[in-house]
Image (cartoon, coloured by chain):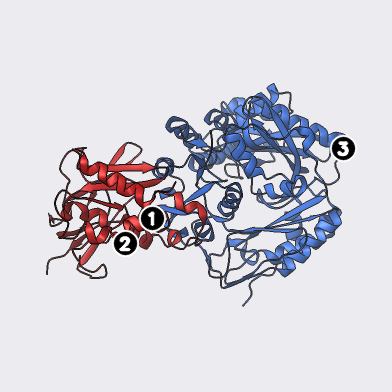
Amino acid sequence: MDIRRILVANRGEIAARIIRTCRKLGIETVLAASEADLDSIPARLADRTVCIGPSRPSESYLRVETIVQAALGVRADAIHPGYGFLSERAALARLCEQQSVIFIGPTAAQIDAVGDKLRARSEAQAANVAVVPGGAVESGEAALSLARQIGTPILVKAVGGGGGRGMKLVDHLENLPHAIELAAAEAGAAFGDARVYLERFVTRGRHVEVQVLGDGHGGVIHLGERDCSVQRRYQKLLEESPAPGLADEFRQQLHEAAVRFAKRLAYRGAGTVEFLVDTHTDQFYFLEMNARIQVEHPVTEALTGVDLVAEQIAIASGAGIRLTQSDIRAQGWAMECRINAEDPGRDFQPSPGVVRAVTWPAGPGIRVDTHIAAGSRVPPFYDSLLAKLIAYGPTRAQALQRLQEAVAASRVEGVRTNLAFHAAVLKDPEFQAGAVDTGFLARLLERSPLQMETGIHG
Amino acid sequence: MTLTAKDVAEITRLLEESNFDELYLELDGLKLSLRRGTAGAAQPLGNGDGSASAAQSPGAGSMVPGAAPTASFSPAVSAPAVGAARPVGPAAAPGPAAAPGPSASAGTASARLAGAPAAAPAPVPPAADDPNNVPVSAPLLGTFYRAPKPGAPPFVEIGSQVEEDTIIGIIEVMKLMNTVRAGVRGKVTQILCRDGALVEYGETLMRVGKPG
């Protein structure tokens, strides 16, 4: 079916980015915005904006019925959910299916399949993709015996979600019952699902993920991997592609595992299969699948020249995957910094406010995805991402240098940002050498806390 | 989709010759509302949903000027109405003079685009900034209904006396009917939203003149 009008059910940089591709494709956009975002850049870019509710996400961006009603009311053919908010809520995909509105994403059943982390684990195993040793927590007794089998350290994780919530690290088995209790309570509050499971904690691991596109009928291609190991408390801050220091054969195995997993689900749309790479044993394990466009997708776009949002729309319209695996040729190197309105000097507290003045970098190989200009408000209700700076170069060294220059050329006045923090990461010798593990950032912060100036100007 | 002045004249003639009082035409995002009518009947539409929502949502109002895609948007519910109205400008322009004014003779169909600001009504409502003329805004986004069911008389009309808890309409969100109450005591002075239209959160549905 032809998609001529899309309701963009999101905000911030991703809303602006989706609208740009729609314009290029000649598709009309209607932005579903909360009261706080009515004069945002995405609202100005969209052909039309409808106010869906008050600022609090629970009363606007998270309302499934309101979003679908808005789509019907403006006669949109499709809804693009972006990332976060309702993007991975099966309820939205399901209501769209019932109302004959195209959901630009996977089917409700696929969202359910990957949203339940235990189910995703068993799908991975069925697709012959290795998972971290672990399993469901049925009872206290069974958990303990499973834990003995796995060996410490152990991670207690939430079945219903991710992002570090409902996650507890256990070093000694006697702490396990308490950790399970805490994790279950946290998971219940955050995801409405108190189930938890156990996984062996990989002490030195890298987070490497593979971008895939599926046509919904078993056709799946991959667009290479991204390394997202630079994380703080499970929040990604810097991503790059390709993943440094992987042997070609290993890299290929990762890609193939991701494709096998997506094929098993007959996955539809753009998705990301996340892996944990154990740097001690050189093995990789399936972690989870993200059934949406990712924040860090521009890194892949820089390398492949593929507009992932355009492909999402094409697949949703029934055009299938317009590329074959051999069309995908990743060239060069790309790196992305997430510029957040937060204060590294105060434990990365969010720093909402009004942006008085802003300068974003430009130049060869530089892309800036943002919704922030002078006068933009950074409301306290939403995540603090201000912009993504993406640098591309023929080699890692050149991409890195361009990104350093881009960070140095960026100025944001009025709110505190993590720009100076990114500058410190980019010049760190361990990062420059490449192939850091997920513990890198915590070690860097411990080693040189004074480097992390506040990043406020004026 | 464009309608020429000739098209509108032709449609108007067809309505005049028919037994119907109203014609509601939707073409590819363009809405044409024709009503064989009196000034009173035309008045709610004449106030322009378009102008109301433009005032409510600065985002929509500040869209990129001349952006081509806007022209095909449904003019009844949003700011782009102005752009959408353009194709039929020549036909719509005589509208205000001929249609809603007291001079409109009974039986003459009045043609104009819903929401076109050019078609302002003749009766002068109290100024929007009059503190005694209180807006009743939509508590949520949805489809606005003025009556409890199709064909039933509207909850309120212009001139209706309302109390704080008087129901003035219904907003439907995916089959869930939410009643909207006046929230203020007084007399309805303006009705700004058409029955069955999409209303946004915070959009002004009506105005109520407070006594005194």
- Is residue A6 left or right of B57 when viewed as pictured? right
**Secondary structure under the numbered disc 3 in the rendered image:** helix
Q: Which residue is mark 2?
A: B118
Q: Do callouts 3 and 1 point to residues on the same chain?
A: no
Viewer-nearest of discs 3 and 1: 1
Looking at numbered disc 3 in the image, what kind of residue is underneath it? Asp
- Across and down, in percent, residue A397 comes to 86, 57
Q: Residue furthest bottom?
A: A458
| Left or right of A179 in this view: A79 | left
Q: Are marks 2 and 3 in contact (CB under 8 Å)?
A: no
Pinpoint the chain carrying mark 1.
B
Vertical side of B81 occupied by A175: above or below: above
Relative depth, front residue between A284 and B129: B129
Q: Badge 2: few (under 14), some or many (20 or more) residues near its Cα, within 10 Å? A: many
Read off the residue under disc 3: A248
Q: Nearer the viewer, residue A360 or A157?
A: A360
Mark 2 — on which chain does it sit? Answer: B
Q: Residues within 10 Å of mark 1 (few under 14, many from 20)?
A: many
